[in-house]
Image (tube, helix red, strand yellow):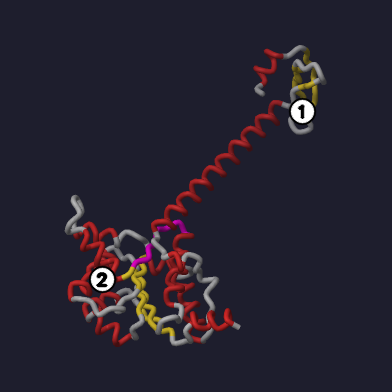
Amino acid sequence: MTDNFAKMRAIDQREDVCQKHGRYTAYRLPNYQREIWTLCPLCEAEKREASLRLDAVRARAEIVRYQMEQLAGQAAIPKRFADRTLDSFRALSPDQREALSICRAYVGSEWEKVAASGRCMCIVGRPGTGKTHLAVGMIREILNRGLPAVYTTVSDVFHRIKESYTTAGLTEREAILAFAKPALLVIDEVGRQYGTQAERAMPFEVINARSVDTKPPVIVSNLDGPHLTDYLGDRIFSRLAEGGGGCLSLTGKDMRKEVARHVNV
């Protein structure tokens, strides 16, 4: 209650002392059950200001939470990988432990350099060794930074760009540039199917668009390094190597079989 409003309603007044601000005039407010006297107006003003600051902090936190939910929704992470993080990755072999460490650095201590150079990362290995888990975990880390990150597959890239041919108001170039906007883009299932020449050309257009803006891509494939090079072609692979891009190879056990074995015991 403000001091002026208290004066208007007051039925009595007295001089009082605040331990923090000294003397002030207190006003008795009408109440039939007990005496109510106003407190130090400066203390009350400070409380109101603190409450407003707290409300502002809560409002900002709510905005950030909403933005994070929006980013997570736009990340297009498959439902079966929705709970995957780098912290939940089970490193069962030396190369998996090394890969986890490199992935943490890529989106952690080295992220500023990665983002500035557009440095690519390729994660290759047999099915079930945790490639997609690591890639989704990196997406989560980027989302936690408040930056957009997206998961997609080669076939999804191809179909989305192909849809632009029949979608009014959307050009092929605009469809390609949409994949260039996120701070991090994961392209999974590279080489899972041999694909047509056109299908294999689509990733290059996306990777090239991201390279122009120095936006890093993460490529995930069951193919090993040499076979991945053959699948993508020298032109795409040389573009991926720009900015110091590297390749992680996972050769551990099939983690899905390991989990199933423990569940069945």
Residue in the image at 43% along x and 77% along y: 131
Q: Position of residue 213 (x, y in %)?
A: 29, 63
The quadrant of the image that shows the C terminus is: bottom right
Which residue position holds label 1?
Answer: 22
Q: Residue 31 falls in which quadrant of the image?
A: top right
Work out whether residue 236 or residue 21 is closer to the camera in this orientation and state it. 236
Q: Secondary structure at mark 1?
A: strand
The answer to whether residue 55 is above or below residue 177 is above
Residue 125 within the magenta-colored segment of the rendering:
no
Magenta stretch, residue numbers: 145-152
Residue in the image at 49% along x and 69% along y: 84
Q: Amino acid at mark 2?
A: Pro
Q: CA distance from mark 1 to mark 2?
A: 72 Å
- Number of residues whose C-alpha sits closer than 10 Å to that of mark 2, classed few (under 14), some (14–19) or many (20 or more): many
Is 145 situated left or right of 246 in this image?
right
**Circle 1/circle 2 CB separation < 8 Å:** no
The answer to whether residue 23 is above or below residue 184 is above
Residue 150 within the magenta-colored segment of the rendering:
yes
